[in-house]
Structure formats: C-alpha cells, structure tokens
Image (cartoon, coloured by chain):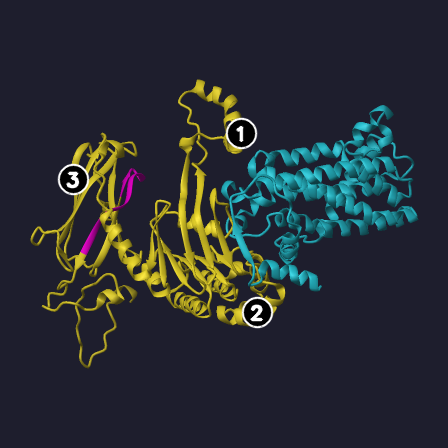
Chain colours: A yellow, B cyan
Amino acid sequence: MKAAVRVDNLGKQYVIGGAEQFYRSFREMVAGMFTAPFHKYRTLKGAVNEKDKFWALRDVSFEIRPGEVTGIIGQNGAGKSTLLKILSRITCPTEGRAVLNGKVASLLEVGTGFHPELTGRENIYLNGTILGMKQKEIRSRFDDIASFAEIEAFLDTPVKRYSSGMYVRLAFAIAAHLDPDILIVDEVLAVGDALFQDKCLRTLSSASKQGRTVLFVSHNLKMISALCDTCIVLDKGRLHSMGSVKDQVNLYLSKLSSETEPDTNIAEMKEHGPMVINDIRVFSTVNNSSVIKLGDDIAFEFNYEADNLSGKAISVGFSLQDITSGEFVLVYYSEFNNKYFYDVNGQGTIRCQIDRFPVVPGKYLVACRVVANNREIYFKENIATVVINEGDYYGTGRLGHRAAELTKVLIDGEWEHHVGETLHGNVDELN
Amino acid sequence: MRHTDQIHQEFFGPDHVTVIEPPKGWHMLDVRELWAYRELLGVLTTRDIKVRYKQTVLGVAWAFIQPVVTMIVFTVVFGKLAKLPTDGHPYPIFVYSALLPWMFFANAIGSAGGSLVSSNHLVSKVYFPRLIIPLSSMGSGLIDLAISTAILLLLMLYYGVPLTIQILAAPLLLLAVLFTALGVGTLLSALTVAYRDFRFVVPFMIQIWLFCTPVVYAVSLVPERWQWILGLNPMTGIVEGFRAAFLGKPFNLTALIISFLISTLIFFIGITYFQKVERRFADII
C-alpha cells in the first residue's frame, strides 16, 4: 500500500536571529550607524556566517501508512514544530523531500484567521475557507458545526464578545468538520476546558477510525498514548526512534529522566548569568534518604555559585512538572513567604524545608529560577527529577487513596459533625 | 464549470499528491493553483470590505468624504490659488476624473504593501498561495472606486459636462490601473516582508508619485521636450486616459501604449520577485 506520508532525509536550516550588534562605546555606535545598514542588508539577503546557522531538523526519514495515528514527541527545540511546519507547507525544507498522498489539512492553531469584528457565522465561512473547505461544503456542514460548538444562540454575535471557551469551541468545531485524508495537528488541544478536550479527543479518534491519517504533536504523553498507534521521538532535530506508542513513550520517559543530570560545567554556565545552581538535592528529612514518600518531610537544597550579589534581593523558586502529562503541579518561590536572600556571594546553599509533602506519587521534573530585584538571573528546566512514592500522608496507616488519578495535591483538614444543629459559619463581620 | 471543479479536485481531492521539496531557483506562477484557491480570495476580500468601516462613526461615508475633500482642497490650492491651466475644463471635474484612478492606485499599493506583514498570523499558520494576500487587500478599493465614480457622474451633471462615446474606454482603463496596481502592490508587499524599511518607503513614495503624475496639473503644463519623462510613469497614460474618457478629450494612444508596456514590465518584475521570496516568508516574517 502507498504510504500516506513519506519523508526522506528532511532537513531545515535556520539562521540564528538577527545577529544583533551591541555597541560597546559611543564611537562604535556612531561607526555602527554607518556600517549597520550594510551588515543588515547582508543578513537580510541571507549571507551569514556558518556559525550563525543551525539545523532545526536534519536527516529525518519515516513513513506513515494510511489510517495510522502517529504522535510526535520530543523536548522543546527537538524540531517537532519545524517538522509540522514543513509538512503543512508553511516553510520549505532546506534539503530532503516529503510526499503526502491525499487531501491535507493542518491545524497548527485553533481559529487561524478568525476576525474579532466578524460574527460567529462569518468566521465559520472565513476560517473554513482558510482551512481549505469549499463554500458549498461549509454551507452543508454549517448546522453541524454550530451545534458541535454549542454556540447556536450566538451565531450573529461578533466573536470578540465570545468567552475564550466559546471561541475555542467554535474554532475546533470548524476544524473537526474538515474531512481531510491527512490531518496534521499541533498541540491545539492544550486549550479549552476538560470536557471540551475530551470531546476533541473523541473526534480525533473517530477521525482515525474513518481511515484518516493523523499526525499529532503534544506534550501530553497521556493524550499521545490514548490516541496514537505509533509514535516518533525527535531529539535535537534528529529522528531518535519510531515505533509503537507504548514503547516510544516509555523510551522517551527513561531518556528524559536520564538526561536531567544538573550541569556540572560551571565555567560554561557562568556565561549565562551572575548566579548558577550547580547542584540540586531533594531528599526526605525523615531518614535523610533520596527515596521520598508522599507525606514525608522533605528538603530542597540548591547549591549555587554566584558573583557578588550582596545587597540584591534574591528569590529562589522551583516548579514540579508531571513527566507524563506535562502539567505543572506546583510553583514555589521564597518570595511567596516574603523571604529574600540579601547576601549571596561566592558559593552557598539555599535550603527549603517542606513538611508533609502533599504531591501525589509520580515522577516530576524540577525547574529552577532565581530572581534578583525582580529580574530573572537564572532559569533552567529539567534540572532534576523527583520521584514521589506511595506514602501515608494522613497518618492513618493506609496507603493508596487512588488520589493520583484524580488530583495532584492532597490537603488535610478537620472534619466535624454537628447533629441536630444548623451552623451558619462565623459571620461576625457581616452583622 | 466542469473544468473549474476539476481544478479544485486536483488540489483538494483525495488523489492530491503534495510534494514538498527545497525551493529551486525561479519558478513560474502557478495560475491553476491560484484559481483553485479563488474562493479564499473572495472570502478574504469580503472580510476586508466588511471590517473596513466597522467601529467607525461615519462608516461608508468615508468612501465619499475622502475623494470629495481631496478634490475640494486641490481645487482651492491648485485651481483657485495657483490657477493651474486645465485645457478649458472646470478644475473640480478636471482633478476629480484623475483622482479616480489615482486614489484607487494609491490605496491599493498602500494596503498591499503592508498586507503580508499584517497577515503574518495567517502566513505562519496555514498554507495557501501567498499571492492571495496582496490581491485580496486591493479588492476592497474597488468598492470605493465605484462610489467615487458615482460622485463623478453627479459632478458632471452639475457642471453640465456631457458623457461621450469615449466613456466606453473606461472599463479597459480600469483593467490597466488594476494591472499596474497588481504589479506594484505585489512587489511592495514582498519587499516589505524582506526589508521592513519599505513600511516607511511606501507612504513617502505614494506622495512623491502623486506629483510625478498629471493629477493636479495637465501634461501640457510640462515643456514638450520633457514630457517623455512623465510618460515613463505608467500612471501618466492611465490618468490622462481616464480624463479623456470622462471629459471627452482625444486619447493619447502613444502614452497609453507606453504606460501599458511599462505596467507589464512592472507586473512581471513584481510577480517574479514575489515568487522568489514567497517560500521564505514564514521564516522571515
């Protein structure tokens, strides 16, 4: 059978932005004013140094059979978007070739070309045509689109008055009625409420059941696993691997966590800013072990190396991101507690103690950010991974509240029952 | 009809094969593909027309106010104060019949110039022949042109200028001005993407171009041995042609032919340059 999508040695080279000139002195600035137009002209014409070029995508080859749903995963900068942009013909490859058999529709954004001043009805025609539908087709599917989006009552209202939920629903409804042979979708499902996301997912999977070929990029590995048959892992612009979705997602997860060694090369990191976190330790202070259980008292220790920042108000923060869903579970800065560090100079450690850690079992990526006088001086994603194991958060001797499936964070309160008595709360201040 | 459906099928049907390859040198304008996307051109043009006067207090009245006020100001300054000769016609009619094609041209190239940059949200998210964008930005000017033509006819009635058989040339002249605007507009839109300097160049250029075109004055005002320079400006023949068509003056065929040849040249340069940079738009926009 003929492949629906066939990609051979595809590559895309970009020129690193602008090569802006920085003026060190007034004299250089004046001189620069005269030479800059020529430099600029050369850069705009495309004559640039080799070192300013980089490959966003290179030597990527794969084949997708008709009716297959393929996920594309990879970290930021892996080349996912570039690949989709080439396959959607928005940008041209620098080398290689791709062949797509059948009618292609690509959704790199919901509501492309929506005009805020136009009504829902007008935007259905506008957006539908932009996405490649004929007027006739739109007319015959119009009622379905409106009811799918649940906006029948607002068809003649300008979309600028729509709530963001309505806007996204309308945009997706149009896209859902495209009827292509090959559908290219980029992360668009990340918007909208959970209910609507579910509806979109069902539409996408029914599209595949009708024999559509779907290429789907997402950070949400759960969604990828639920929707796709096969999966492509991109890494730094190269095709890392391709295969069944289960294998690829597991491979990707293990790859992610093995790559989160904090940078030890301080000399190199120093160039990025006046302060560098060169080691991060997360451990349970119950038994000083790196095995953390839900509900343990834990500590985050950030070892840093810094220039003399004495007198500056330093706030350190970190976030935890669920490795499978890509969702951020929490963000916490010292400044939330009005805690700033004023004497950062040379080496040291900033420590954050958290009692009864409430995040449910799972694997999380840690990102760290340092702010000095409200300006970011350090930021790094994937600086470490934290594994939280099942634990007795409520101190009841029981494990596993199956909370991880429903929620990300546990809370603890006090429960009472007042028999035969109706409480009206503590409303003193209202009386 | 059958044939056009075939073209649509070719580009949107299930047998469509998309081959994506690096751009290789110059390539010809794909007229068939453009035709397959004609509905998009229509939809984008109607969008521009619908949106144009939204959120304005005076609305469509602007389509009257702009040409009429320009005409009044020009009449006072160039007709009454400077007393420019008009070969015997009332100055308001003399200047207005030339403003008709000129304002269409100036608005068309002005809006086409910035059209790609301001549509970057489309260019970076979805594929279609990029030429559609400058084309659609010029479409809404046709409505204004129709309105200002109606005003001219009223003015002629008022001044008692009779319509002659010459008016039949107007549709041809309209095609000529469209053609010229297309060439200049596409060229400027592509240049503006590549070099944002053209955002400043275009308004400035339009202003200067106005005075290099016999709109406020008659060609006869220019010494005869220099008139050929004026003739190199493709708008000269067109503007003079419009004037002749409405005021019943004889046509200057040589000027028209030269204008047409230069327009054609500009048109091909515009389209070719556009095609050349088209594939890089998404990367540099």
Q: How many marks?
A: 3
Q: Nearer the N terminus, badge 2 or badge 1?
A: 1
Q: Which labelled disc corresponds to residue A349?
A: 3
Q: Which labelled disc corresponds to residue A224?
A: none
Callout in the foreground (3, 1): 1
Q: Which residues are magenta?
A: A369-387
Tag 1 residue: A41
Towards the viewer: A376 or A3 = A3
Disc 1 residue crowd, few under 14, some 14–19, many 20+, Cα 10 Å: few
- What secondary structure predominates along the stretch shown in magenta? strand
Is residue A322 among what the camera can see? no
Callout in the foreground (2, 1): 1
- Residue type of the residue flagged with mark 3: Thr
- Residue type of the residue flagged with mark 1: Tyr
Q: Secondary structure at mark 3?
A: strand
Question: Furthest-front residue in view?
Answer: A1
Tag 2 residue: A142
Is residue A363 among what the camera can see? yes
